[in-house]
Image: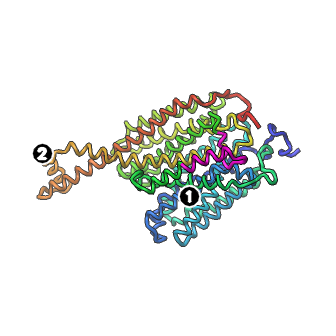
Amino acid sequence: MVPSDLPDQQWKPAFNPWLIAVAVAIAAFMEVLDTSIANVALPHIAGSLGASQDQATWVLTTYLLSNAIVLPITGWISSAVGRKRFFMICITLFAASSLLCGLAPSMPILLLARALQGIGGGGMQPMSQAIMADSFPPRLRAAAFALYGVTVLVAPAMGPILGGWITDNYSWRWIFLINLPVGLLALGLIFKLVEDPPFLRRFKPGEMHLDTVGLSLLVLGVGALQILLDKGQEDDWLGSNFIVTLIVVSIVCLSALAVWEWRHKIPLIDVRLFTNLNYSGINLMMFLAGAVAFSSTVLMPQFLQSLAGYSAQQAGMVVSVGALSLFLTMPVVAGLTTRVPVKFLIATGWLLSAGGLYLSTRLLNLGISFPVAAFIMVLQYAPISFIFVPAMTASYFGIAQDKSDSVSGMTNFMRNIGSSFGASVVTTVLARRQQFHMARLSEHLDHGSAALASTFQALSLRMHGSVGAGSQTMGLALVYQYLMGQGAALSFIDTYVVLGTASAAMFFVSFLLKSNDPKQAEIHTGH
């Protein structure tokens, strides 16, 4: 009897599930890496293609936009063409468009290639997660999700480091071209190792009908949301008619989408899943976990390079230490899921996250040493393991097995949108709070004070070796520069406070999640 002939509950993959996990993890890592690897290469791309810096930022935006649109509808597409076939189509499109990115002769061609790359990448994350969920028995799923978690959490941290090294030593085009051999390897492994379980839902002849209204609302709503999150602070949020328009379009279209999909017979997005309180809670957790994890990845390197005098390579090494902690904590958390109810693990993760972010505010300073900076990154990265792995495991509680593709698509969508939201919040808080602290610190300067004039002269003498007519001006410039640094440092501390407060709130929300028996045999409750 071949595996696909077995009853649903007894089905097992033909190959060792860990081989399958490694194969899909390669694809997932490659895709997530591309969400951040191009960041540091934007000036090189702009210069090479004769584009402005603003135009170059669309290299990131177009990818995130097309990626976000595909993610929530992966369940429907999988039912239409089959999970394995869809996964292989995504890898092929991703690799081919990566080649086109690397060879692009102009910015419009590069943006088109990035949009296609985002479409292909949008299906790779949820299919990887869904394949892992169905390939492993319930008692080993958390261990599989730990491997998946390492790929999707480490890749964004490694992207800027790898992208910077490739760009400095070779060419920005190679940050895309390296995807081709990796994609071909993943494609071959998926073709050989992966098969569709018999319980997956497939549309019957004549049943498949593309919901064009739902798709249009999705493209407009998610597209507007992604662009406003990306460009909001840059365009001064509500001070920009463009951003206000995007907010209105996003709210109207996404609200209409929810109502339309609820009433549709074969919806693109199964919004009825959100009637499951546990499913809704997990999606909220994934949203904020994405926001906190991505914000932590962005904040520390920015602080170290802009204020503490670290090079890009040194800042990258600090982030690498934090990412390394995931390799140590993920297996531990996976083991605990067989002994401790997942909601308690998730609550522990949020509590550790809040505590780590609070401690970060006490350790952060302009003269920060490498060990302290690395310790802060560990404090912020390690708790994510306690959230991510149990949350992915719990996302399937109470959900029929044939809905696994829809579940993985939505949870990955929420994590990705959470990452964009986190980056937007961080950028806004940093800019607004730096202005606030600069204004408050400046209030304490009495420009007519003889003591201040003496300080200006002493600073000029120390920095330039002379005291002249311009000494007060030079001293004032030095004091202003010092205040700028202090104001910026305080704004980073405020940002950590915001993230820590959100983590503390999620600690209490965690107890609303469905309680489970760690030794139960099944995660799914229906077929």
Give SS at disc 2.
Answer: loop
Give SS at disc 1.
Answer: helix
Residue 63's tag is: 1
Report x, y in % for residue 18. 71, 44
What residue do we see at 46% from left, 71% from top? 50
Pick the front one: 466 or 192:
192
Q: Is residue 66 above or below residue 294?
A: below
Report x, y in % for residue 323. 52, 45
What residue do we see at 78% from left, 50% from top? 203
Residue 328 visible: no
**How is colour applied across the structure in the image?**
rainbow
Residue 449's tag is: 2
Q: Would residue 139 be found to the left or right of residue 36 on screen?
A: right
Report x, y in % for residue 485. 31, 48
- Callout 1: 10 Å neighbours few (<14), some, many (20+)? many
Name the chief secondary structure element in magenta.
Answer: helix
Magenta-colored stretch includes residue 299 = no
Q: Quadrant of the C terminus?
A: top right
Q: Earlier in the sequence, mark 2 or mark 1?
A: 1
Pick the front one: 171 or 343:
343
Task: Answer with the quarter of the image where residue 343 lies.
Answer: top right
- Callout 2: 10 Å neighbours few (<14), some, many (20+)? few
Report x, y in % for residue 101. 57, 66
Q: Which residues are magenta?
A: 252-273
What residue do we see at 45% from left, 57% from top? 242
Amino acid of disc 2? Ser
